[in-house]
Image (spheres, rainbow, N blue to C red):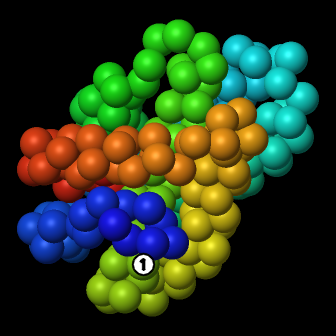
Amino acid sequence: MRPVLNLAEPTDPAWIQRALADLDAVLLDHAHAEKKAASAALTLIFRYPERSELLRPLSELAREELEHFEAALGHLERRGVGFTRQKPSPYAGRLQEAVRTAEPGRLVDTLLCCALIEARSCERFQILADRVEDPELAAFYRELLASEARHHGVYADLARKVDPDAPARLRELARHEADVLAQAPGWARLHT
């Protein structure tokens, strides 16, 4: 397991080649992912209003995700790429299949799945920052690294507050996340 990000497996080099071959598609998907991340944080606030320990951290996280969404839109505009609908990647849905249905397991697993999505984004932003030839886009991905790592930590810490045994469950879900990626379609997306 990758210790800081809690990923069970590193990104397959084949993803790197796909991403670099179609950066516009990856950037479009990235914008969609930031929008979905903001929505996920807000959904948790609405679903668990009695969980006061979740409210402020998730509210702050949602605002930051929307700032990242706006920044991604700016890079799309600079590159002459319109923000359009996109066939959703099966990644998040497949990851959520492992979420338990009974509470508090449902909350813990949802928080941990969000942590893993943020961790994978962080890992891939590092790859893009190191490999993208467009200096502005590379700098954008470099700027996001600390935020994505922090978001991963926020979700993992919140899960631990709900259930002190959350780290063990995170390891299980990290294996599931690696399996989901291994079976993902070969699209040029952030999470395939």
> Which residue is outermost to the top?
102
Residue type, label 1: Gln
Can you give x and y, in whole percent of width and height, for residue 71 in the image? 62, 60
Closest to the observer, 119 or 191: 119
- Which residue is identified by label 1? 126
- Asked whether the viewer can see residue 174, the reply is yes
Query: Seen in the image, is 151 located left or right of residue 10?
Result: right
Please give the name of the residue rendered at 83% of the width and 18% of the height, measured from the top-left corner. Answer: 49
Query: Seen in the image, is 134 located left or right of residue 58?
Result: left
Closest to the observer, 14 or 73: 14
| Residue 12 position by quadrant | bottom left
Can you give x and y, in whole percent of width and height, for residue 63 in the image? 77, 46
Please give the name of the residue rendered at 62% of the width and 20% of the height, measured from the top-left corner. Answer: 104
Closest to the observer, 133 or 146: 146
Residue 148 vertical placement versus 113 (above, below):
below
Residue 42 vertical placement versus 21 (above, below):
above
Please give the name of the residue rendered at 68% of the width and 25% of the height, measured from the top-left corner. Answer: 44
| Residue 125 position by quadrant | bottom left
Element under disc 1: helix
Around disc 1, counting alpha carbons within 10 Å, would you say few (fewer than 14), some (14 to 19), or many (20 or more)?
some
| Residue 96 position by quadrant | top left
Q: How many numbered dots are placed on residues in this image?
A: 1
Can you give x and y, in whole percent of width and height, for residue 123 in the image? 40, 70
Residue 90 vertical placement versus 57 (above, below):
above
Please give the name of the residue rendered at 71% of the width and 15% of the height, measured from the top-left corner. Answer: 47
Residue 49 vertical placement versus 125 (above, below):
above
Closest to the observer, 8 or 39: 8
Query: Seen in the image, is 109 located left or right of residue 186?
Result: right
- Asked whether the viewer can see residue 136, the reply is no
Assign the N terminus to one quadrant of the image.
bottom left
Can you give x and y, in whole percent of width and height, for residue 187 in the image? 15, 49
